[in-house]
Image (cartoon, grey):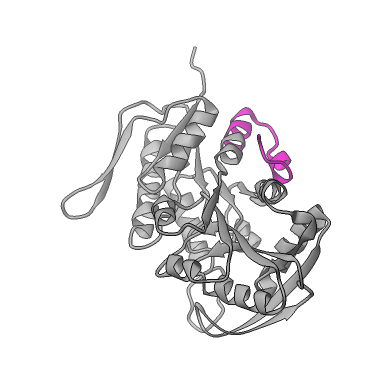
Amino acid sequence: MATNSVKLLTGNSHPELAKKVAERLGIDLLDMSVFKYSNQETSVIMRESVRDEDVFILQSTKPGEELNDGLMELLIIIKACKTASARRITAVMPNYPYARQDKKDKSRAPISAKLLANMLQKAGCNHIITMDLHASQIQGFFDVPVDNLYAEPSTLRYIRENFDYKNAVIVSPDAGGAKRATALADRLDLNFALIHKERSRPNEVSRMTLVGDVAGKIAILVDDMADTCGTLVKAADVLMASGAKEVAAIVTHGILSGSACEKINSSKLSKVVVTNTVPHEEKKKGCAKLETIDIAPTLAEACRRTHNGESVSFLFSHAPV
């Protein structure tokens, strides 16, 4: 009699996170290889059967030139599982790429987040698990179920354990993150402040204004994504100039592209805490201010609950121990 079990697969984008999730689930990663031919075409070899199995493919985004390679790997692995008769294929994408291209904000701009949704479904994906989408409406781009998990429960635990949080203020570095920051402030019963920023061009902040009082407090900046870190560094300057005792940043997706680590090292930020949705171990070696929140338990529990047909909404407000 056939038994349906969990099969966890991964490409080359974030094998460390995949191993942690596998350990948490008490299983081994599927024996497979993802490689490139000499002409740079990507191919996959799976050495185990996935017929009628519940397949979870964990593939994050490694910043830089390998981002699109990681996407292509994911699509090819999904298609390979589909043609190998997997019962269900779930793409576990801790950081959904192209999430900032979610609307036509100027003439002739592509909505690349929707294009990616189409590609994943066409390849054969039946379900998506992701974390802290840049815009929650991206879930509507899919015709299959999407579970958008939150890093907030893990962030709350980190703040309670590592800060004198009773003397802190939660700060949003822009108006777009106000909802995220206020939700965190409400859970901690803290005050909230907001920084209004004006951009002269993409990825470049020109002027910042603080709304709220941070004098004599620990200012904790919260955001969903840190790319070049220009916003966080300038926000730290504004907060320290406004009398903050200390400024720290907690970010879900630490993309940290370009000279981000150099900016952090020379900034007034005491530390920048990121989750491991994006691989950043190499960057930690050159940036002593970087700290990590492990979200592997949350992803593993989401996979387990999905496989067993249980609700995952418990994870929206609780972090697995």
Q: Residue at x 56, y 49 (%)?
A: 130
Q: Is residue 233 above or below residue 271?
A: below
Would residue 45 be found to the left or right of residue 244 on screen?
left
Residue 167 visible? The answer is yes
Viewer-proximal residue among 74 and 61: 61
Residue 55 visible? The answer is no
Q: Is residue 246 magenta?
A: no
Res. 184 image quadrant: bottom right
Q: Which residues are magenta?
A: 302-321
Can you give x and y, in whole percent of width and height, for residue 162 in the image?
67, 49
Q: Is residue 318 magenta?
A: yes
Viewer-proximal residue among 187 and 146: 187
Can you give x and y, in whole percent of width and height, for residue 98 in the image?
48, 64
Viewer-proximal residue among 197 and 132: 197
Res. 86 image quadrant: top left
Can you give x and y, in whole percent of width and height, for residue 60 in the image?
45, 50
